[in-house]
Image (cartoon, helix red, strand yellow):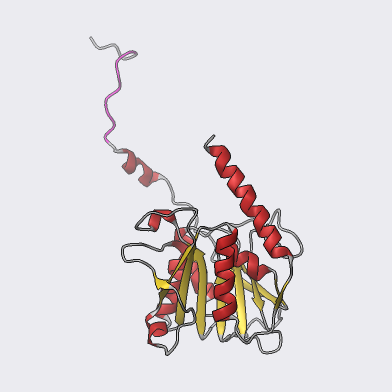
Amino acid sequence: MDDVITDLPPPSRFLLEDLNNFTPPPPPLPSPFLVFASPNTNKCFTPSLLIIAMSSPSLHFLHHLSPKTLIGTLILPEIPFSGNSIEPSLKDKSCNIYALNEDDKLIMIALVQFSVTPERSHAVAKMLVGEKIVPDRVLILDSVQSRNFRGKLSHDETIAFKLETTFERKNSGSIVKGLDYYPSGSMVDGLAAALLSRCELKKIKGTLCVSWPDLGVPVMSLVKSLLVKDVLTGINYTTDGDYADEYMRLSRRKDRIDSDLYT
């Protein structure tokens, strides 16, 4: 006679993934949305250039660029506001949108200072390009992800590549000169890929520039040179002296943290 207390129970008729079918799916996240400083929210902005910065060097350089006017913010509902400062700061988890020229708003800048998950990338890209903001041209600045790069990357080597939409390639002159195209077999994913796809879909001249590494004085010099010589030519602007020192302190702190992990 079987011992019903000590004997193992019979196997379940359901597989583990089948049991999950009885769990109600989580409620969908609210869509991201734009909040503008102007009371006329129905206005559509049509800048000649929209710069979307995500890499550390581009965020630091453009954050300290002036004169620029804060005109809006992209809100991602799952990103909390707690810990953000009243005045825009590089330490905030935010996506502020600026006009570089207050009079005619020829150039707009979006500083993406929070991580966007892959499943939310297309929704964020839709908000930034093609609805309330319809630019003639888009420049996306991101970092090379080593997991997506076909080849070896050294922290002692500073490199940058570009990808362009079909409409940009057909244009008479590329906005970024002197950069090689991203090597065949390497990949770009996340928000950068979603933004470039959005430009392709909307037939907007779009360029994605990816640089390596994400921190360090050489890569800052490279990104700054790219922006000053090719992108911001003819635009009256200044940069305060804090960005270089602040970026150097961040790079040293990151290097120290990384080295401590391997000691």
Task: Name above or below for residue 246 compared with residue 259.
Answer: below
Does any portion of residue 130 appear in the rendered image? no
Q: Which residues are magenta?
A: 6-13
Left-right relation of 253 to 22:
right
In the rendered image, residue 148 lying in the magenta stretch gets the answer no
Percent position of residue 34, x then y: 61, 72
Identity of the residue drawn at 43% across and 67% down: 193
Percent position of residue 133, x then y: 56, 81
Q: Say which of 127 and 64 sits in front.
A: 64
Quadrant, the N terminus: top left
Percent position of residue 140, x then y: 51, 72
Left-right relation of 195 to 99:
left
Quadrant, the C terminus: top right
Q: Say which of 140 and 6 sits in front.
A: 140
Identity of the residue drawn at 55% across and 68% down: 222
Main secondary-structure element of the magenta-colored stretch: loop
Q: Say which of 43 and 95 sits in front.
A: 95
Percent position of residue 234, x then y: 62, 87
Outermost residue on the right side: it is: 86
Task: Name above or below for residue 76 compared with residue 162.
Answer: above
